[in-house]
Image (cartoon, rainbow, N blue to C red):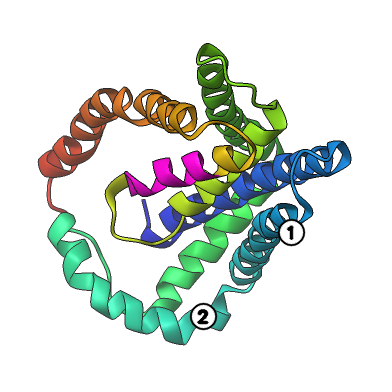
């Protein structure tokens, strides 16, 4: 798959995910505000979540619809990334110039936007993934007999996902994510011991039980496939 088109699929997935994330988080904050479930100072801090999401969404859409504006920056990035890309896939064609990448990206992004049914299906899939993360933590809290509102869980997962999107070199944000989930739940009155237990138990479901399945899939369809591909001449 061309490098630019593959990048377009990742960016579009992120855009669709942020839209679902933004809608559900904004609704949850409105419900919490209406029911006076948190101090006003805390709500002001939590309001930064949809604000950051809106900014991120705007940036992604802006550069996706006008990718030529970042050509100078991409020229430098591609020159630095070329050795790594060729090391992973020896037959990869990367000439270190942004014009080819941006052309592939623009074509792929616009083609995906025209496939409306698939766009809707992708959005619903992203929303389903988001909803499952919320449901897992909520069910774990119920199992621990914690009195936590569903809307509080939505906001808690929102903060956790925002932290996971932060470009920090910590695999899976292990430790940081759990600390954030525990802190937010404690802010809404959940005992720290229960909040920490819920964060760890939900993490076991969302990460550690997925690793064996995704690991086998990555090996079989990823590294094994690339390693056995004939070199194109």
Q: Quadrant of residue 166?
A: bottom left
Q: Can I make out residue 208 in this image?
A: yes
Residue 6 covered by magenta stretch: no
Vertical placement of 35 versus 160: above or below? Answer: above
Q: Nearer the viewer, residue 39 or 18?
A: 39
Name the outermost residue toward the bottom. 72
Q: Residue at x 11, y 43 (%)?
A: 227
| C-alpha distance separating marks 1 and 2 | 34 Å
Q: Nearer the viewer, residue 34 or 164?
A: 34
The mark found on residue 44 in the picture is 1
- Disc 1 versus disc 2: nearer the observer: 1
Residue 176 covered by magenta stretch: yes
221 on left or right of 160: left
Q: Residues within 10 Å of mark 1 (few under 14, many from 20)?
A: few
Q: Main secondary structure of the magenta part?
A: helix
Residue 230, given in percent of the width and then of the height, sits at 12, 45
Q: Residue at x 57, y 57 (%)?
A: 109
For the magenta stretch, what is the residue range?
Answer: 173-183
Task: Residue under label 2, please give it.
Answer: 70
How many tags in the picture? 2
Is there a contact, CB below 8 Å, between mark 1 and mark 2?
no
Q: Nearer the viewer, residue 125 or 175?
A: 175
Vertical placement of 167 versus 202: above or below? Answer: below
């Amino acid at each position: 798959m061309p490098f630019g088109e593959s990048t377009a699929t990742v960016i579009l997935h992120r855009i669709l995910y942020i839209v679902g994330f933004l809608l559900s988080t904004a609704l949850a904050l409105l419900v919490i505000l209406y029911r006076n479930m948190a101090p006003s100072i805390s709500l002001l801090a939590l309001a930064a979540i949809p604000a950051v999401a809106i900014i991120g969404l705007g940036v992604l859409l802006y550069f996706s619809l006008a990718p030529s504006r970042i050509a100078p920056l991409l020229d430098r990035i591609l020159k630095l990334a070329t050795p790594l890309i060729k090391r992973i896939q020896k037959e990869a064609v990367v000439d270190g110039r942004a014009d080819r990448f941006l052309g592939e990206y623009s074509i792929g992004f616009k083609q995906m936007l025209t496939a409306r049914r698939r766009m809707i299906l992708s959005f619903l899939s992203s929303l389903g993934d988001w909803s499952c993360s919320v449901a897992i933590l909520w069910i774990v809290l119920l199992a621990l007999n914690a009195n936590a509102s569903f809307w509080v869980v939505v906001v808690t997962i929102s903060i956790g996902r925002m932290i996971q999107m932060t470009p920090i070199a910590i695999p899976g944000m292990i430790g940081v994510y759990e600390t954030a989930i525990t802190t937010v739940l404690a802010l809404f009155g959940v005992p720290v011991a229960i909040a920490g237990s819920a964060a760890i138990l939900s993490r076991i479901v969302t990460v550690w039980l997925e690793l064996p399945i995704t690991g086998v899939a990555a090996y079989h369809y990823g590294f094994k496939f690339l390693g056995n591909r004939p070199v194109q001449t």
